[in-house]
Amino acid sequence: MRIVHIIPGNTAITDGFDEFINSKFDKESHTFIALRKSDKLIQSNTITIKDKFDFIGLVRMIYHMNCCEKIIIHGLFSIQLTAIFFLQSWILKKSYWVIWGGDLYRYLGPKNKVKDKLHELMRKYVIKNMGNFITHIKGDYELVKKWYGSKGKYYYSFTYGSNLYNDKIINIKEEVNNKVCIQVGNSADPSNNHCEVFNKLRKFKDMDIEIICPLSYGDKKYASRVINYGSEVFGDKFKPIIDFKPIDEYLKILSKIEIAIFNHKRQQAMGNITTLLGNGKKVYIRDDITTWGFCFDHNLKVYRSNGDFKELFTKMDYETVQKNIKNVSEQFTEEKLIMDLKIIFDS
């Protein structure tokens, strides 16, 4: 069985994915194609396409796509990649799309330019005829069927090691203080809707709080606007994270978080959400997105970010905290990940 993985390149989501697959499965059965240079995808069975003008790299990719038994697409964002599938419709039935979120919700975005309209036209054909879909958010698969009329098979998997249960936050010892640390958002993507949350939190600005806002990746101009507005509302209580942190340092920051608010109007930040829930933190998300249904299906207690925050500072009871920790620790294990991927690879 020869399986080709098409991966965007340098992303935190796919860090170490090729190494993980090579160590847990038959290395000879997998080829990884990185769509741009990556410092993290460096295994011997990884092919790198330097840029969209790398003709030789593109020819190699197309060759492997036609010679393999399965193609696994890790995020369907690129118009060039969409065009390659559109022009090779015969490979769609053996293709598996790992839905990331932003690639699916492109459907709702503006399409004012001719390029955007052409891209969506090709996407409609490609997605409708795609043979298989991979996601641990069942609601996203339902949207694929609703929006694109797809009839492909559904596979459950959280796919990446970044989604594994991590109890390191619980084990980090922090100095005891009365300050309530609140995380807002997970990136500098406008979909976080930071300012809407800041306006709701404004009434608490005189309390002993600290607003922690990860902004180390995404839209830099948007990040600048968020920093300016956050500082205006909360003063020195606003603590933006603008530089990438080593994992141990980032976990130390997360260990201080008591409340996390994610105000995305679509499925996003799942790694942050499950990590925080699995470490006993209080998490707010919108109740009108597929992530809410995911948490319900996995027996995880979350709160409404599109509510009034009346119970923001009410601590979760001990049983609820322990239930969240237990459910995440049991459902996001390496053993479960390997089992789900095996089903996909062997199907």
Image: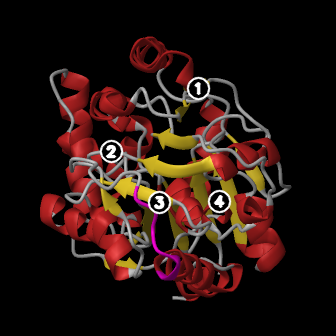
Q: Residue at x 73, y 38 (%)?
A: 38
Of mark 4 and mark 1, the one earlier in the sequence is 4
The quadrant holding residue 284 is bottom left
Viewer-nearest of labels 3 and 2?
A: 3
Number of numbered labels in the structure image: 4
- Amino acid found under the numbered disc labelled 3: Lys
- Dominant SS of magenta comes to loop
In this rendered view, identify the residue nearer to me: 200 or 116: 200
Alpha carbon of mark 1 to alpha carbon of mark 3: how far? 19 Å
**Number of other residues with Cα within 10 Å of mark 1, as a class: few under 14, some 14 to 19, many 20 or more:** some
The residue beneath circle 1 is 239
The residue beneath circle 2 is 264
Alpha carbon of mark 4 to alpha carbon of mark 2: how far? 20 Å
- Left or right for 267, reference 47: left
- Amino acid found under the numbered disc labelled 2: His
Residue 208 in view in this figure = yes
The residue beneath circle 3 is 282
Kindly state the secondary structure of the residue where label 4 is placed: helix
- Amino acid found under the numbered disc labelled 4: Ser
Of mark 1 and mark 3, the one earlier in the sequence is 1
Q: Which mark is residue 162?
A: 4
Q: Residue at x 75, y 35 (%)?
A: 245
* Region rendered in magenta: 314-319
Provide residue 243's location: percent of width, then percent of height.
Answer: 69, 25
**Number of other residues with Cα within 10 Å of mark 3, as a class: few under 14, some 14 to 19, many 20 or more:** many
Provide residue 92's location: percent of width, then percent of height.
Answer: 37, 65
Q: Is residue 183 magenta?
A: no
Provide residue 163's location: percent of width, then percent of height.
Answer: 60, 64
Alpha carbon of mark 4 to alpha carbon of mark 1: how far? 24 Å
